[in-house]
Image (spheres, rainbow, N blue to C red):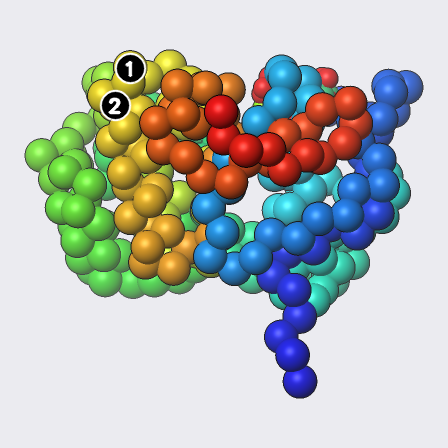
Amino acid sequence: MNDPPFIRLYKLGKAYQGKEPLYQNINFFFEKGDFRYLTGASGAGKTTLFRLLLGLEKPTWGEVHFRGRIVAKLPPPKRPLHRRSFGIIFQDNKLLLKQTVLQNIRLPLIIQGVPLRKADHQVAQLAEKLNLTSLLEQPVSTLSGGEQQLTALARAAIHSPAVILADEPTANLDLEMSARVLDLLELFHQEGATVIFATHNLELLKERPHPTLLIKDRNFFEVKTP
Ligand SMILES: Nc1ncnc2c1ncn2[C@@H]1O[C@H](COP(=O)(O)OP(=O)(O)OP(=O)(O)O)[C@@H](O)[C@H]1O
Ligand SMILES: [Mg+2]
């Protein structure tokens, strides 16, 4: 039997109460191993799409399928496992500022019940790859914006999720730091992750072309990178 589609949007529509729909009747597939930019004006619904994929938000119409299952219909006991397939870098990074880099990055492992020593070992290995080792004991509040985004990236990827959702992780970074973030996402992609990267940064799109999905006029468009 064929594998079910990896991510399928089926007649998907979303409208918040009392507002015009963000999108309607969207049919789209994300394949395993895709690296896609997601772009569109502020308010187009990029973050909302991530929330729909995670199951934090329900579609108003249609369905989001992940590996053949309808996300909104997952029974409560299955939901944590679903979320574990995703690593997300939030638009406002959601790091715990008073906690150290190490404590932040290992959190998803602790939630999964990985023993502390094993978790710390995994964090040490990833930190080396990301050049973060010297920062591990520092509270996040003392880091630069770029260092914080690298920490958020490490926290999103520490449990080797099948999908990494990056919500404008380079919004406040200079070109050099943005390139570093992208290098790392491309590395995770090479290691097998599917990456969806929401961004407004046209420079980045130009310099590092990947297939791009544009949300516009309540629809999704596949666009050629400019
Ligand atoms: N919980 C909510 N209740 C009502 N409206 C909401 C809610 N969440 C988002 N919206 C609205 O939905 C629209 C899309 O929001 P979303 O955060 O998905 O946009 P975005 O494309 O990520 O924008 P940005 O580029 O600014 O991050 C916005 O107009 C927002 O105000
Ligand atoms: Mg957003």
Q: Is residue 121 left or right of residue 193?
A: left
> Residue 130, image x and y in percent?
20, 41
Residue 98 sits in quarter: top left
Residue 177's disc is 2
Q: Is residue 169 left or right of residue 182?
A: right
Q: Nearer the viewer, residue 122 or 42?
A: 42
Q: Is residue 73 above or below residue 154?
A: below
How packed mark 1 is, by other alpha carbons closer than 10 Å (few <14, some 14-19, many 20 or more), is few
- Can the viewer see residue 124? yes
Q: Does the residue tagged 2 have its C-beta within 8 Å of any atom of ligand 1?
A: no
Q: Nearer the viewer, residue 127 or 61?
A: 61
Ligand 1's image quarter is top right
Mark 2 in CB contact with mark 1 (< 8 angstroms):
yes
Determine which residue is flagged by label 1: 174
Q: Is residue 182 above or below residue 75?
A: above
> Residue 96, image x and y in percent?
37, 29
- Which residue in the rendered view is the most extreme toward the left? 134
How packed mark 2 is, by other alpha carbons closer than 10 Å (few <14, some 14-19, many 20 or more), is some
Q: Residue drawn 61% across and 61% down?
A: 6
> Residue 70, image x and y in percent?
75, 59
Q: Residue drawn 17% across and 53% down?
A: 125
Q: Residue drawn 23% across and 56% down?
A: 122
Q: Does the residue tagged 1 have its C-beta within 8 Å of any atom of ligand 1?
A: no
Residue type beneath disc 2 = Met
Q: Is residue 11 left or right of residue 108?
A: right
Image quadrant occupied by the N terminus: bottom right
Q: Is residue 135 left or right of residue 167?
A: left
Q: Is residue 155 above or below residue 3?
A: above
Residue type beneath disc 1 = Asp
Residue 121 sits in quarter: bottom left
Disc tally is 2
- Can the viewer see residue 106? no
